[in-house]
Image (cartoon, rainbow, N blue to C red):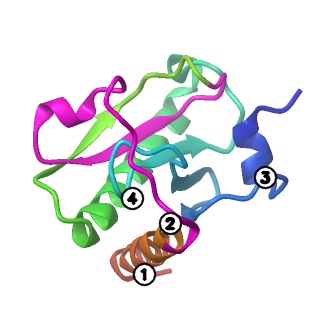
Amino acid sequence: MATVFTKIINGEIPCYKIAESKECFAFLDINPLAKGHALVIPKKETDYIYDLDDELYLILFDFAKKVGKAIESVIPCKRIGMIVFGLDVPHAHIHLIPINKQSEMSFASPRVKLNREEFTAIAGKIVNAFSEMNPG
C-alpha cells in the first residue's frame, strides 16, 4: 500500500510543493516547527533512508541542499537544521527546518499554526527562490 508521501507525490493528497526533480520531491510540512519547515523525499518509496541505493542517497542529499538554500534565502534564520527522523511515515524523508537556536529543532516543541494563505505565500517564495537558484 502506498505511503502518504507517495500519495502526495502522485497528487492524490494535496500539498504545498516547493521543488521537484526526476528523483525527488519537496513540500512544506503541514505541522511545522517553524515557517518554511519542509520535507524532502525520494520519489522511490523506501522506508529507511539507509536502504536507499548509494546513487539515490547522494541525489536526495544534493536536492535537500538546494531546497535548504532556497528556504534560507526567503525565511529569516541563522541556519537550516536537518533531521532524518523517519519513524512517523515509512518513507525516507529529510526535515529541513529554519532555526535561530538549537532548541527550535525539538519535535516536542509547540507547532507553528499557519493558515492556507500563509502556507501558499511561503511556498511561492521558496518555489521562486529554488527556480532562480536552479534554472533548467
Q: Counting residues from the N terminus, which is met first, the one under dot 2 or under dot 4? A: 4
Q: Which residue is mark 3?
A: 13
Q: Secondary structure at mark 1?
A: helix
At label 4, counting other C-alpha atoms closer than 10 Å, the crowd grade (few under 14, some 14-19, many 20 or more) is many
Left or right of 64 on screen, residue 72:
left
Left or right of 25 on screen, residue 13:
right
Which quarter of the image is occupied by the N terminus? Answer: top right
From the viewer's perspective, is the residue at label 3 or at label 4 nearer? 3
Which amino acid type is shown beneath numbered disc 2? Phe
Q: What stretch of residues is rendered in magenta?
A: 89-117
Q: Toward the viewer: 87 or 59?
A: 87
Left or right of 111 on screen, residue 82:
left
Q: Which residue is mark 1?
A: 128
Q: How far is mark 3 from mark 2, CA to CA?
A: 16 Å
Q: Toward the viewer: 34 or 17?
A: 34
Which amino acid type is shown beneath numbered disc 1? Asn
Q: Which residue is mark 4?
A: 67
Q: Which residue is mark 2?
A: 119
In the rendered view, tell whether residue 69 sits above or below residue 121: above
